[in-house]
Image: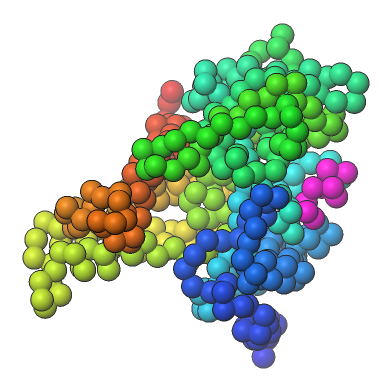
Amino acid sequence: MDDLNRFRQETRDWLNENCPQGARGPGPMSIGSRSIKLPVDLTLWLDRMAQKGWTVPLWPKEYGGAELDRDQYRVLIEELQRINARTPLTGRGVNYIGPTLLEYGSDEQKARWLPRIARGEGAWAMGYSEPGAGSDLASLTTRAVLKGDEYVINGRKTWTSDAVDCDYIFVLVRTSPDKPKHLGISLVLVDMQQPGVQVHPIRLLSGKSPFCETVFDNATTRADDVVGGVDNGWTVGKRLLQFERSTHAGINISGSQGGRNDDSGVPKTVVSYASDSDGRIVNPALRTRLVNYTMNDAAQKLTQKRVIEELKSRAPGFASSAVKLTGALLKQEGDELMVDAMGIRAVGVDDQQFLPSETAITRNWLYGKSLTIAGGTKEIQLNIIAKRVLGLPD
């Protein structure tokens, strides 16, 4: 038995013995947060995987990882999928700021932050966009002023997803207002559990409030929690965006995110609502759309696997924009297919008149409209592809 086959067998045996039944099947992935209490099985699963270093399999052991190579990582993901195990840890800690710290963090920052991220100790929010600085992010005005060994932060950020449940936030702030706008920005790490940080949920069309506005009113952070150096935030922040977009695209291998089983259930839903007694979809236009969607979905998954296997760095660079965009458009097309197939059953939000599964599809369809905005708008991704991938002129 060669080394990789031995690793597969050992991994399979360990997962079979240690993955609780409550951590298998569909459902949410585990995230660490002071304010969210996980079910017993998910807590146990997170703890066991963290002890193995498999919440962040490619990270160095000294920071809570397992230092797996790419082939071993692929085997681990395949074995997780084989038993339908939920990803033990996901979120902006392992997928965004963690790998950014591995590249740009000081030795002290890595030693202080990365092990706790690997253990799921604290959920992270993202402080980038502002009411007056969205696509033109470099126009941000949130200020950080050095006073002694701390920075004092004032300003506001919007679209800080899940901030109401988060413990920490990484924030782009202006540290040198006299410099050109791209050159006076820094990325800082802030503890949200302080009076100077206030979070206000934003209610969405879907009825949920995952997006928030976060206000900094004389909030403070340590001076040594500037990542990548003072006024170097534009460079560091752009790299973090690559990790974010690759996560949206399903190709970020910084954590164990690749183990997530992503079955949208589109074919099953369309067939159950739009077929005759023989299971044949009656509407030929709907049938053609489903065939095209299924082929595109298969191509998307193959592309994700190919990018992961070809990856030579922890973030796939400009490929993340392409795969993120096609994934978002595919998700929206799948949602439209289900809604069209369901007809009147897709317009309800009241569980008393509609099945919970039906209202869930409706809310997901509404939420899915944000996917070509969140993580970088469709227009921004197209510009990146045009300039950085295709080499087209400005």
> Which residue corresponds to the image point at 80% horizontal and 30% vertical from the top-left?
221
Specify start and end residues of the magenta stretch as a single range: 108-116
Q: Is residue 334 left or right of residue 114?
A: left
Q: Is residue 61 left or right of residue 370?
A: right
Task: Tell which of 230 and 86 is nearer to you.
Answer: 86
**Quadrant (top left, top right, bottom left, bottom right) of the C terminus:** top left
Task: Tell which of 394 and 382 is nearer to you.
Answer: 382
Return the x and y of residue 147 as percentages of the image width and height: 86, 18
The extreme bottom residue here reads 1
Can the viewer see residue 8 in this picture? no
Count of numbered tags: 0
Picture quadrant of residue 317 = top right
The image's colour scheme reads rainbow
> Which residue corresponds to the image point at 34% horizontal and 44% vertical from the top-left?
366
Return the x and y of residue 128 as percentages of the image width and height: 59, 30
The extreme right residue here reads 148
Task: Tell which of 16 and 326 is nearer to you.
Answer: 16
229 in relation to 36, above or below? above
236 in relation to 352, above or below? above
Q: Main secondary structure of the magenta part?
A: helix
Q: Is residue 196 left or right of residue 260?
A: right
200 in relation to 71, above or below? above
> Which residue corresponds to the image point at 83% horizontal and 19% vertical from the top-left?
146
Return the x and y of residue 61 as percentages of the image width and height: 81, 63
Q: Is residue 13 magenta?
A: no
